[in-house]
Every structure is written in structure tokens, then in C-alpha cells.
């Protein structure tokens, strides 16, 4: 391995044997060669470790770290903490980087010291690798900031490259967040640096499938990240910085609050509709059956009415939190 690398690619793996070969190969076959590839095997019980070792035995750019399972957030922090590159590129174990990804993002970040993060448009694929469509990202930074502050995140985690120095200045991913650690990081990064996109050019393939956490689990942490952003903006104590005991109390209240507002069910409906719309080969009977169950749900009407009347759950969540915890 070269003594000094420019980019550290960081991947956390947990039972990802199905797509791991393709994902690792997509990094090793990059046109940009001066990188290290840190792979954290986060307690996998399938053949993930042996797959990684088979690549590591033939390419010394791979640094394999085996550990007991501790989750994505802590794994990424560990991987970045041992990295030596000036830039960090992320890739998930089920996603694919196109050959020029590292080269093009490196060139963008090198073009200006003011740029802290580069992200790209992406192509969505299904579990078998079939393309579902291209997702063009918002490129104007002011619009990106507005979207993030409203809980809208179209920056795919596997599409980013950022300066390690900025990541370290923010103390990395916040380990209280089991999910949406990337969304929270973007919210904090946008306060101190500028993002740049590759506009319409897709540099990664993002895999969407029914077994993914995004599809199956309600993400309370996304709401906590936005609330945290509002608190910082108004110089109110950030609840994500509370001691463990106080944070646990806050988390329980937040989860109960969001469930009482049916956010968990509304999110499931949105995910179902989004997943359906991306399927190109779904059987008509399956489409109609699922669509019927969704549209008959009263929560679908809630989603529609919120869109029409502009109700913002994030603003209400923040206001009610301030009252509950006596910050109002």
C-alpha cells in the first residue's frame, strides 16, 4: 500500500453476503487508484468475512477490521478514526460505485477549499440489480439546506465524499442515533461548510429491497435530527447532547409522541407507495391489491391532507417538545 493515500473508502458490513462481491469489486475497479478501503465486519454470521478476506488477500488496499456487532454508527466512526485519507468516501455493502466515482468527486473537492462534501445523483436498482430509475438530486445548496431542515433528504449515504477534517471537527456521527446518522451529519455539516453535487450525473447504484431497514422500520431518529437542528438554530440545548439518563427520557417521550401522531403508520404508507411506483415488473393483481389496501387506509388521507394544507409535523414536534421539557 502507498504510504499516503488521498481517499479512505469506508464500508460497514453485517450479513451482506448476497451483494458484497459486487459492492467491493466496484470500489477496487475505480479509475482513481490512490485510496485505502476500510471494511468493518460488524459481527456478521454469514459468509461476509470470508468474502472480504478473499479480496484482501489479493489487494492490499483493503483493511479488514473484525468486531462484535455494535451497529452502523459506531462502526463508521471506528472506520473513519483509523483512516489516513484526507477525504472519506462512503459505500454500503449492497450498493455499487460506478468506475469514475472516486475520480470525479475527488476533482470536485480539490477544486475549492470551501467545499466540504460532494454527493451525486444515483440510479436505483432492485434486489437482482435491475434498474428502477434515475434519481436526480437537488444541486443548489440553498435548496438542499431548505430540504434538509424540513426532513427531506435526497443525499444518498453511499454517494458522498467529504473532508475528514470537517467530520472530525463535528465529532463524527452521533452514536445516540442508530439510524439517520448520515442525515444528522448533513444537517450539522451544512452549518459550517458548502456541499456540491455532480448535478444529473449518477455515480452510484443504490439498491432498494423489501429487506432493507429503510423499507421496514420507522425512523424516529430522522425526526430527532430535525428537532436537534431546530434547537441549535434557536440556541436551545440540543437534546442529542443530553446525558444518557436524560436522553433516554427524551427518546421515550419522542417515540410515544410520534406514534400518537401516527407518523409510524404514515411513513409505512409512504414507503409502500414509493416501493410500488419503482417496480417495473410487478404483476397487475399485486399492484392493485396493495394499492387498494393503502388507499383505503385513513392514514393515506391524512398524508394527502397534510400535503394540501402544509402541515409540518417537524415544527409541531419541536414546539411541543419545548413545552414538555420547559424550554418554551
Image (cartoon, rainbow, N blue to C red):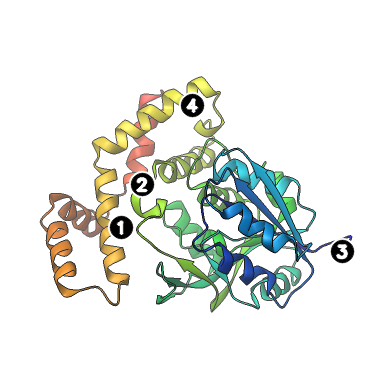
* Residue corresponding to mark 1: 271
Q: Which residue is mark 2?
A: 217
Could you classify mark 3 by the number of other residues whose Cα lies within 10 Å: few (under 14), some (14-19), or many (20 or more)?
few
Picture disc at residue 2: 3
Could you tell me if the residues under marks 4 and 1 are in contact, i.e. CB atoms within 8 Å?
A: no
Q: Are marks 2 and 4 in contact (CB under 8 Å)?
A: no
Q: Nearer the viewer, residue 274 or 23?
A: 23
In this rendering, is residue 108 above or below 191? below
Q: CA distance from mark 2 to mark 4?
A: 21 Å
Verify CB contact (< 8 Å) between mark 3 and mark 1. Answer: no
Residue 116 located left or right of residue 272 = right
Q: Of all residues shown, which one is farthest toward the right?
A: 3
**Left or right: 132 as drawn, with respect to 300:** right
Q: Is residue 207 visible?
A: yes
> Closer to the camera, 190 or 44?
44
Disc with the residue nearer the chain's start (3 vs 1): 3
Give me the residue at 30% from left, 77% from top: 280
Question: x and y percent of residue 204 in the render?
Answer: 55, 71
Mark 3–mark 1 distance (CA, rounded to whole Å): 44 Å
Does label 4 or label 3 sit earlier along the sequence?
3
Nearest-to-viewer mark from 3 and 1: 3
Separation of disc 4 and disc 1 at Cα? 28 Å
Quarter of the picture containing the C terminus is: top left
Q: For mark 4, does the 10 Å Cα neighbourhood hold few (<14), some (14 to 19), or many (20 or more) residues?
A: some
N-terminal of the pair, mark 2 or mark 4, is 2
- Look at the picture and state if 80 lies above or below 118: above
**Quadrant of residue 281 in the image?**
bottom left
Residue linked to disc 4: 247
Amino acid at each position: 500500500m502507498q504510504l499516503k493515500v488521498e481517499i479512505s473508502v469506508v464500508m460497514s458490513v453485517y450479513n451482506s453476503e448476497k451483494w458484497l462481491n459486487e459492492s467491493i469489486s466496484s470500489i477496487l475497479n475505480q479509475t482513481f487508484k490512490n485510496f485505502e478501503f476500510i471494511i468493518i465486519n460488524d459481527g456478521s454470521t454469514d459468509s461476509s468475512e470470508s468474502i472480504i478476506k478473499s479480496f484482501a488477500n489479493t489487494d492490499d488496499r483493503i483493511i479488514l477490521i473484525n468486531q462484535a456487532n455494535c451497529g452502523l454508527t459506531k462502526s463508521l466512526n471506528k472506520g473513519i478514526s483509523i483512516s489516513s485519507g484526507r477525504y472519506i468516501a462512503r459505500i454500503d455493502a449492497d450498493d455499487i460505485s460506478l468506475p469514475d466515482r472516486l475520480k470525479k468527486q475527488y476533482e470536485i473537492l480539490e477544486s475549492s477549499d470551501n467545499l466540504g462534501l460532494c454527493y451525486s445523483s444515483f440510479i436505483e436498482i432492485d434486489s437482482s440489480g435491475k434498474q428502477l430509475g434515475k434519481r436526480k438530486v437537488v444541486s443548489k445548496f440553498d435548496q438542499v439546506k431548505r430540504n434538509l431542515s424540513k426532513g427531506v433528504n435526497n443525499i444518498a449515504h453511499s454517494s458522498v465524499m467529504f473532508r475528514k477534517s470537517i467530520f472530525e471537527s463535528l465529532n463524527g456521527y452521533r452514536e445516540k442515533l442508530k439510524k439517520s446518522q448520515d442525515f444528522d451529519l448533513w444537517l450539522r455539516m451544512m452549518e459550517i461548510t458548502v456541499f456540491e453535487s455532480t448535478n444529473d450525473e449518477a455515480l452510484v447504484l443504490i439498491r432498494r429491497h423489501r429487506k432493507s431497514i429503510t423499507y421496514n422500520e420507522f425512523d424516529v431518529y430522522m425526526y430527532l435530527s430535525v428537532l436537534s437542528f431546530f434547537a441549535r438554530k434557536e440556541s436551545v440545548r440540543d437534546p442529542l447532547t443530553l446525558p444518557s439518563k436524560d436522553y433516554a427520557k427524551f427518546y421515550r417521550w419522542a417515540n410515544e409522541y410520534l406514534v400518537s401522531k401516527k407518523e409510524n403508520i404514515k411513513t409505512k404508507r409512504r414507503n409502500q407507495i414509493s416501493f410500488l411506483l419503482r417496480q417495473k415488473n410487478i404483476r397487475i393483481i399485486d399492484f392493485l391489491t396493495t394499492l387498494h389496501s393503502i388507499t383505503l387506509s385513513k392514514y393515506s388521507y391524512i398524508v394527502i391532507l397534510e400535503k394540501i394544507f402544509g402541515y409540518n409535523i417537524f415544527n409541531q414536534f419541536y414546539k411541543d417538545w419545548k413545552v414538555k421539557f420547559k424550554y418554551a
